Amino acid sequence: MDMEERKHYGMPIWSINLLFFIVLMLFITVGRIVQSKSIYPGLLITEFVLILLPALIYLVITKQNIVEVVKLHPITLKQFFLVIGISITGYCVAVFLSLIVNYILSLFGELIPSPIPPITTGGEYIKGLLVISGSAAICEEFLFRGVILSGYQKLGGRKAIIISSLMFGFMHINVQNLVGPLVIGIILGYLVYRSNSILAGMVGHFTFNSIAVTLAYLASTFQGVNGDMMNEVPSLDALPAGFLIAAIVVWMIIAIGAAALLVLFLKLFNKTVGDQGNSFEREAVVHKVKGGFFAYLPLIAAGIIIVAEMVFQILIISGVVKI
């Protein structure tokens, strides 16, 4: 897709950045309050009311074609299964990188436990799939790979994917869970951009989260059978340093093989897209950002808040701050 063919939506960069800032503020205020009261209802409110609704309101106010902006286009059955394969292999790579970061953080102190309660029953597992996997796949993809990716697409596909992925990763505001979402965001952004379909992102996001939920359920089940062998650790990101080292070695071996398969699946996915999808070839910056530096002020403000939050988390981990 060359300069003349690339679609430009009537969404100024400053407005996209402002939308992100608003969603972030809702997330760290209202989102935390509702999740602290009851985690699963709180997550549903966060996803549908604090993430999806503002994005929908934004598209209505700016009079956008929702189908085109969000890329509500179908994917083929072959693409569907390839996305699942890409997500599984990509997850292995993301977990390996996350474990390295968590090991480094664990050298400074005790990692912060996951706020998600252990998944110990079949009913909780189904609830986890619906809430953690399903709602995030719909709402977060709508915002990040739909609105934000399309808004930044005027700067070129590569920049749009990287920027939207950075927003997605930092939006989690979790220093222990930063690298994983960044990697996953890039993979999902690539799939959506190349296929021009948000469904690729939704299927991939659901797969990523479902693997995490399934592993958490299996870990809890194993824990229940084997007593206190894992000291009731709720998730990989809260493993003690000794377990983390062992986990890193195991996941490194898995990640090497997964990375090779990931490259293969991506090549096969590209073949299914062909010339019909968005292309990175002949890309150039075709639009000067309206407002220049000021267009990025909401993003800079968001970044300052996020960095401050993560520094605070590091201080908690290191024991400097007690909670």
Image: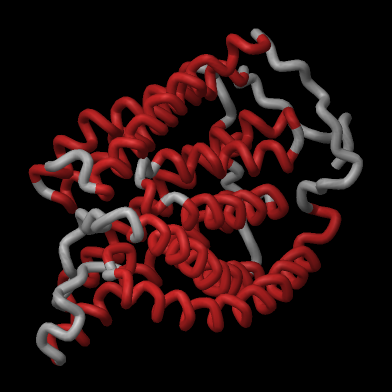
Q: Position of residue 34 (x, y in %)?
A: 15, 39
Instruction: Find residue 123 and report its image quarter.
Output: bottom left
Q: Tell me if residue 323 comes above or below residue 83 in the rendering.
A: above
| Count of numbered labels shown in the rendering | 0
Q: Position of 52 compared to 323: left or right?
A: right
Q: Where is residue 108? Give x, y as percent.
A: 32, 54
Query: Image quarter for residue 77?
Result: bottom right
Q: Is residue 272 left or right of residue 216?
A: right
Q: Could you tell me which residue is drawn at 39 percent across and 32 percent down?
A: 306
> Residue 87 vs residue 43: left or right?
right
Q: Residue at the bottom extreme? A: 225
Residue 120: name its quadrant.
Answer: bottom left
Along the line of sight, the residue nearer the viewer: 119 or 3: 119
User: How is the structure coloured here?
Assistant: secondary structure
Between residue 60 and residue 140, name the one nearer to us. 140
Relative to 167, residue 122 above or below? below
The foreground one among 267 and 109 is 109
Location of the N terminus (image quadrant): top right
Residue that appears at 45% across and 58% down: 101
Tell me the residue at 30%/65% (across/down): 129
Q: Is residue 147 above or below residue 57?
A: below
Q: Image quadrant for the C terminus?
A: top left
Q: Is residue 279 left or right of residue 154?
A: right
Residue 291 position in % (x across, y down): 65, 8
The structure residue drawn at horizontal position 54% and vertical position 24%, both measured from the top left corner, is: 16
Question: Picture coordinates of residue 141 (x, y %)?
Answer: 48, 46
